[in-house]
Amino acid sequence: MTHGYDSGRLNLPFTGICTFAKKPYVEDWGSLDADAAILGAPFDAGTQWRAGARFGPRSVREASTLFSFGHDGAYDHEDDATYLGSDVTIVDMGDADIIHTDTIRSHANIEKGVRAALDAGALPVVIGGDHSVNIPCIEAFEGQDPFHILQIDAHLDFVDVRHGVTRGHGNPMRRAAEKGYVTGLTQVGIRNVSSTAREGYEAARSMGSDIISVRQARDMGIQALAKRIPMGERLYVTIDIDAFCPSIAPGTGTPSHGGFLYYEVLELLQAVANQNEIVGIDLVEVAPDYDPTGSTSILAAQLLMNFLGFIFHARKMY
């Protein structure tokens, strides 16, 4: 194996420019050539309480440099596997252009970025931003083959219209369920006092959602939970960082106690990477100013790095 150490430059995590995992920056979206493409979506005008997720992409990128020591991949002794070696190409597309106060144009710019990744045959990985950025992410798949959605989140996000708002961070799963190419949703981690009323839960179930709380997920176990997701289907994964307990992820706008711990989500992601074709990812609602330790951003970066490793390792196996 070759390592960055052999090149004569150490290039430690705290040096250089903070692209995701120190991967190459590609400004020209028409020239993308990669297995996965990272897109920042620093939009948080869809929030209903604490804003600040607009700084999520920048913070998660900075945190991701912690895992970029120049090794040829990342060896996991438990799995006896090396993930994200030189055979996996990841690039950073930078950020979609955000127009302040303009949800429609900002979302259109996010959709454009995701479409560029898809057109290039790359796995789109979007870092939000609030959860409304999932709406243009899903809209970018218009004309693609159908897929199921796995949502890992504390909140249902299935509001139809609230005071005329249809594209806020409480609406994305409702907008997704309306798409003919979305075959269904598995919503995991939903708990406690919710921003969605009872009729929202009823509407979600009537439109094909399987809703599972943290306690229900723990009772059934991760492998049984993974089997609730249609085996072999194309799968889009949307992760709200508030799915995690705020004791380990306080840096978010709407924290909800009683959430998942790291390995619970990691093992679910590994399971679905092995049983489903992952077609897109977004990770949202990291608001770093509420976490001076930086641990929320590190959690987000570590989760994405591991998930990407699982996805491309699984692709090599089949």
Image (cartoon, rainbow, N blue to C red):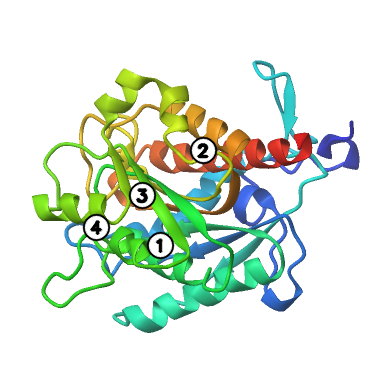
Mark in front: 1 vs 2: 1
Q: Tell me where residue 36 appears, x and y as whole percent.
A: 67, 55
Left or right of residue 166, residue 38 in this image: right
CA gap, disc 4 and disc 3: 25 Å
Left or right of residue 304, residue 44 in this image: left
Helix, strand or loop at label 2? It is helix
Helix, strand or loop at label 1? It is helix
Residue that badge 2 annotates = 303
Q: Pick whichever of labels 3 and 1 is earlier in the sequence.
A: 1
In the displayed structure, 33 sits above or below 312; it is: below
Q: Amino acid at mark 1?
A: Asn
Q: Quadrant of the image for the C terminus? A: top right
Q: Nearer the viewer, residue 191 or 147?
A: 147
Helix, strand or loop at label 3? It is helix
The residue located at (75%, 59%) in the rendering is 34
CA gap, disc 3 and disc 1: 19 Å
Query: Which label number is shown at residue 158?
Result: 4
Q: Amino acid at mark 3?
A: Pro
In the displayed structure, 285 sits above or below 135; it is: above
Q: Tell me where residue 75 appears, x and y as whole percent.
A: 72, 25
The residue located at (72%, 41%) in the rendering is 315
Query: Which label number is shown at residue 288?
Result: 3
Residue that badge 1 annotates = 134
Mark in front: 4 vs 2: 4
